Amino acid sequence: MERKEFLRTLGAGAAFALTFPCLQGCSKDDGNGDKVEVPTGIDFTIDLNSTEGQALAENGSFILKELVVVVKDLDGNFVAATQICSHESYDQVRYLTNDGGIFYCDVHGSRFALDGEPLNQVDSTTAKPLKIYNTELNGDILRVYE
């Protein structure tokens, strides 16, 4: 018996009751973050000697702060990007050391270069760049700002 025929024999109410939990569980969007707006007016500092800042001691490390991914890239440079993916506005952008260092959103697989340019335009997951913020290092104080 085919699926459509089986569902017709159950009736609409029974079919809904049986399939709704499965459909919800199969959705990749649920539970992988929140849809939010890209933050504006970003201007904060990180003391690199603080507990928070020490998480950026190693090349390839990153922290999340105020919906921003702050990265110490593989060359030791500081880079900051929004956590909000330009594809569908989920707050799941993180830094990966793959391919020399990229920003990655695991909700739909969007990949971005450190300058925010999309890397997977071929499959049209996203064609919009990721918002990148300015960084400035003064002694042990890292400033992230627009």
Image: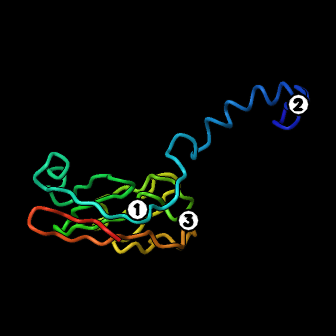
| Quadrant assignment for the C terminus | bottom left
Q: Which residue is mark 3?
A: 125
Task: Give the left or right position of residue 56, taking residue 106 as reference.
Answer: left
Question: Residue at horizontal 58%, vertical 70%?
Answer: 124
- Contact between labelled residues 1 and 3, with CB atoms less than 8 Å apart: no
Q: Which residue is mark 2?
A: 12
Q: Position of residue 7 (x, y in %)?
A: 85, 32
| Quadrant assignment for the N terminus | top right
Vertical side of 51 occupied by 87: above or below: below
Closest to the camera, between mark 1 and mark 2, is 1
How many callouts does the rendering have? 3
Q: Position of residue 80 (x, y in %)?
A: 31, 65
Q: Which residue is mark 1?
A: 82
Task: Give the left or right position of residue 48, taking residue 9 as reference.
Answer: left
Disc 3 on helix, strand or loop?
A: loop
Vertical side of 65 occupied by 75: above or below: below
Q: Tell me which corner region of the image, top left, top right, bottom left or bottom right, holds residue 137.
A: bottom left
Q: Residues within 10 Å of mark 2 (few under 14, many from 20)?
A: few
Q: Label 1 sits on what residue type? A: Thr
Question: Residue at horizontal 21%, vertical 71%?
Answer: 136
Q: Residues within 10 Å of mark 3 (few under 14, many from 20)?
A: some
Q: Label 3 sits on what residue type? A: Thr
Q: Nearer the viewer, residue 113 or 48?
A: 48
Q: Is residue 66 visible?
A: yes
